Image (cartoon, grey):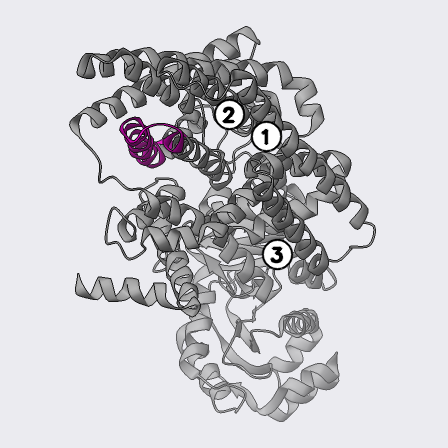
């Protein structure tokens, strides 16, 4: 499964977030993803992400959020990671704790099975407290990449 | 008019142009039928009206000579109609309803005869003060009034896919009353001869002639039925079965002409023999002949209209025609009612069968022409013109009465095939208007609950305002069941499929079925209209197929229940 994540995650898509609000944080990650050829329409990605957040927040507690979208304009699944050391307080997580790690997953409309597998893999990795702490204490995106893909 | 004369010449000069004429008649007849169908009037009226427009009464594009030349087509149509009617008359039907059919045929035929004859006689006597003449004319037209036209009546039954006791009774009556008409005619012409002092032909001769016609037709039909049965051993494919059957029908018609037999009767006996000798195997043959027949019917009815000549109409003839029409209609209604009552037929048959017996056609016109040859021009003219004028009227209004009666009896549409039933429906008629809906923000637990409580293959996903967003099948749910930790992360919105096909309640069901077939789906989401995404219902193939099967069974039971 780790192999799977490394297949869809690139170091350049891992960011230390400057943003202090949910909106800014998600926009930063959308901006990063939009740089990739897998994303053919940034606007559609953005709309998809907001639409999903409107239905229910993707903040699943433990300082984690997994915004995700499955839309036509994504050619291959892709992952972006945002780390906010100070935490985003307006994310409205399930446990009301500030969100510190955001993993954004975008997949194509017909990649249902892979999309579900990626979501499941990411959440199960980050439910481990040791790994979450390691990510938050990382000094570089390189370290976060290694933690997520080789831990 | 100059151009019309030219057109007429064009059709008369070479054989090639007959093909052009036939083509135009079939095309124009079909268009006419479509227009009348839109006006909810049986198609057969459309064919006849087109015939009237292009024939002797109207534009005279087809002359009497041309029609005479094309008479074989009329025979062909009568032969096919006779054969198909015969195919409906299985012996067990007679075993079950024979008494009823017999009583009703006698009732409606004699009823018309007994009412038309005295009233017409009274009026003609009043006008001419000639007792012999008035009796001669009225007894002959009275006898002719008993005949019903099987062709146009049965066309209406077929067009509206009727089934039930009234349908069965009407079919049998129109098939059988030709024989009664021939008997009454033989009796009437003899009586007329006696009254006008022209008794060169004896009653016994007339009876012999009637028996000859009836038994001759039966013999011919039975022989060809046996031939078809034997031939069926060697004919298994459609491309041989159809031409051989049509060939035998043509030979039956041809020999009926050679031996001066009634074409409908002999081909009807052919049909009766066939259906009773090989009931199962002949089903396909009758179906094939039915499918082959429509262009011939169209021509037949267009020619019926084209042939009608109303140039000799005088006030006296108009009044005789009116008496004939009123007396005949009344006589048939009362007579059929009495016949049905005596034989213990159910209410629908008692009440409505008379209304189905107004049409008159080939047999009536044929008998009037025979009478025309037999009597002096003074009598002949009145008989032929009265029958022609009344044929026109009843051919135009009769089919609508047949439709009305069958509608009232609840027998319309009870004989539909699955395909025809599908063609009748719109999506709105069969869709599930209250399907289980999965909301876009439903979590995994809710989705699974919906799946466990219902037995749908797929579920529409819609927001709180019922705007359609997508659909979920078990396939999507299956993926989630094999993963873990997603319970609070996944909503219906995340796993749903985008909409592929949509229909509206107004979409014809057949079109929706084709759409599903193309996309290999077994369901379709239904939205209020093409501009809106508001969910109106859901259509699942196996549920609709079940509904259709149930409906077919209900209709069959209803028809049998009525029967």
- Answer above or below: position of B49 versus A66: above
Residue at the image point whose x is 56% and y is 24% from the top: B210
- Residue A124 x, y percent position in the rendering: 70, 69
* Badge 2 vs badge 1, beta-carbon distance below 8 Å: yes
- Is the residue marked by circle 1 packed among few (<14), some (14-19), or many (20+) residues within 10 Å? many
Residue occupied by mark 3 = B522
Query: Distance of mark 2 from mark 1, alpha carbons?
Result: 9 Å
- Answer above or below: position of B499 versus B80: below
Residue occupied by mark 1 = B213
Q: In which quarter of the image is residue A62?
A: bottom right
* Badge 3 vs badge 2, beta-carbon distance below 8 Å: no
- Disc 1 versus disc 3: nearer the observer: 1
Magenta segment's dominant SS is helix
**Marks 3/2 same chain:** yes
- Residue B91 x, y percent position in the rendering: 70, 26
**Pick the front one: B25 or A29:** B25
Look at the numbered disc 3 and give the secondary structure of its residue: loop
Look at the numbered disc 1 and give the secondary structure of its residue: helix
Query: Distance of mark 1 from mark 3, alpha carbons?
Result: 59 Å
* Badge 1 vs badge 3, beta-carbon distance below 8 Å: no
Residue at the image point whose x is 62% and y is 28% from the top: B212
- Residue A121 x, y percent position in the rendering: 69, 73
Residue occupied by mark 2 = B182
Chain letter of mark 2 equals B
């Amino acid at each position: 499964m780790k192999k799977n994540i490394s297949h869809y995650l690139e170091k350049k898509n891992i960011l230390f977030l400057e943003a202090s609000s949910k909106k800014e944080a998600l926009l930063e990650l959308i901006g990063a993803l939009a740089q990739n050829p897998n994303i053919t329409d940034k606007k559609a990605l953005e709309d998809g992400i907001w639409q999903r957040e409107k239905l229910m927040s993707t903040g699943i507690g433990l300082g984690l959020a997994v915004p995700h979208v499955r839309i036509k304009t994504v050619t291959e699944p892709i992952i972006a990671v945002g780390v906010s050391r100070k935490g985003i307080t307006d994310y409205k997580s399930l446990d009301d704790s500030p969100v510190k790690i955001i993993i954004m997953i975008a997949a194509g409309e017909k990649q249902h099975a892979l999309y579900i597998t990626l979501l499941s893999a990411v959440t199960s990795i980050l439910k481990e407290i040791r790994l979450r702490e390691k990510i938050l204490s990382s000094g570089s995106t390189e370290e976060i990449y290694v933690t997520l893909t080789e831990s | 008019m100059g151009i019309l004369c030219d057109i007429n010449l064009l059709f008369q000069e070479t054989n090639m142009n007959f093909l052009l004429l036939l083509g135009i008649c079939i095309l124009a007849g079909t268009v006419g039928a479509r227009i009348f169908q839109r006006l909810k009037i049986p198609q057969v009226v459309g064919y006849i009206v087109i015939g009237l427009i292009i024939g002797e009464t109207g534009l005279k594009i087809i002359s009497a000579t041309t029609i005479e030349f094309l008479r074989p087509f009329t025979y062909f149509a009568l032969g096919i109609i006779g054969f198909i009617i015969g195919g409906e008359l299985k012996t067990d039907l007679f075993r079950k309803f024979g008494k009823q059919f017999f009583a009703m045929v006698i009732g409606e035929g004699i009823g018309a005869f007994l009412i038309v004859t005295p009233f017409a006689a009274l009026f003609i006597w009043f006008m001419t003060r000639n007792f012999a003449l008035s009796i001669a004319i009225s007894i002959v037209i009275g006898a002719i009034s008993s005949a019903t036209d099987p062709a146009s009546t049965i066309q209406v039954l077929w067009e509206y896919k009727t089934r039930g006791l009234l349908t069965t009774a009407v079919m049998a009556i129109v098939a059988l009353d030709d024989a009664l008409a021939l008997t009454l005619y033989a009796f009437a012409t003899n009586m007329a001869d006696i009254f006008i002092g022209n008794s060169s032909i004896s009653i016994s001769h007339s009876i012999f002639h009637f028996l000859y016609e009836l038994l001759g037709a039966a013999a011919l039909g039975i022989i060809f039925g046996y031939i078809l049965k034997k031939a069926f051993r060697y004919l298994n494919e459609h491309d041989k079965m159809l031409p051989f059957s049509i060939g035998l029908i043509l030979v039956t018609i041809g020999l009926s002409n050679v031996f001066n037999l009634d074409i409908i009767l002999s081909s009807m006996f052919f049909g009766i023999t066939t259906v009773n000798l090989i009931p199962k195997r002949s089903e396909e043959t009758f179906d094939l002949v039915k499918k082959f027949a429509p262009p011939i019917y169209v021509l037949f009815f267009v020619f019926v209209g084209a042939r009608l000549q109303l140039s000799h109409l005088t006030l006296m003839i108009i009044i005789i025609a009116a008496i004939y029409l009123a007396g005949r209609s009344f006589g048939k209604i009362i007579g059929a009612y009495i016949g049905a009552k005596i034989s213990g037929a159910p209410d629908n048959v008692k009440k409505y069968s008379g209304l189905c017996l107004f049409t008159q056609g080939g047999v009536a016109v044929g008998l009037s022409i025979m009478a025309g040859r037999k009597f002096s021009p003074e009598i002949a003219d009145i008989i032929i013109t009265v029958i022609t004028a009344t044929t026109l009227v009843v051919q135009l209004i009769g089919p609508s009465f047949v439709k009305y009666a069958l509608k009232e009896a609840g027998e319309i549409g009870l004989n539909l095939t699955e395909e025809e039933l599908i063609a009748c429906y719109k999506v709105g008629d069969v869709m599930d208007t209250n399907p289980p809906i999965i909301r876009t923000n439903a979590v995994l637990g809710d989705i699974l609950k919906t799946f466990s409580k219902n037995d749908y293959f797929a579920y529409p996903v819609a927001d709180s305002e019922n705007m359609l967003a997508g659909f979920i099948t078990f396939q999507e749910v299956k993926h989630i069941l094999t993963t873990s930790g997603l319970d609070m992360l996944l909503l219906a919105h995340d796993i749903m499929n985008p909409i592929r096909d949509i229909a509206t309640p107004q979409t014809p069901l057949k079109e929706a079925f084709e759409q599903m077939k193309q996309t290999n789906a077994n369901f379709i989401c239904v939205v209020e209209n093409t501009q809106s995404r508001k969910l109106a219902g859901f259509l699942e193939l196996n549920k609709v197929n079940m509904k259709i099967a149930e409906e077919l069974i209900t209709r069959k039971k209803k028809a049998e229940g009525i029967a």
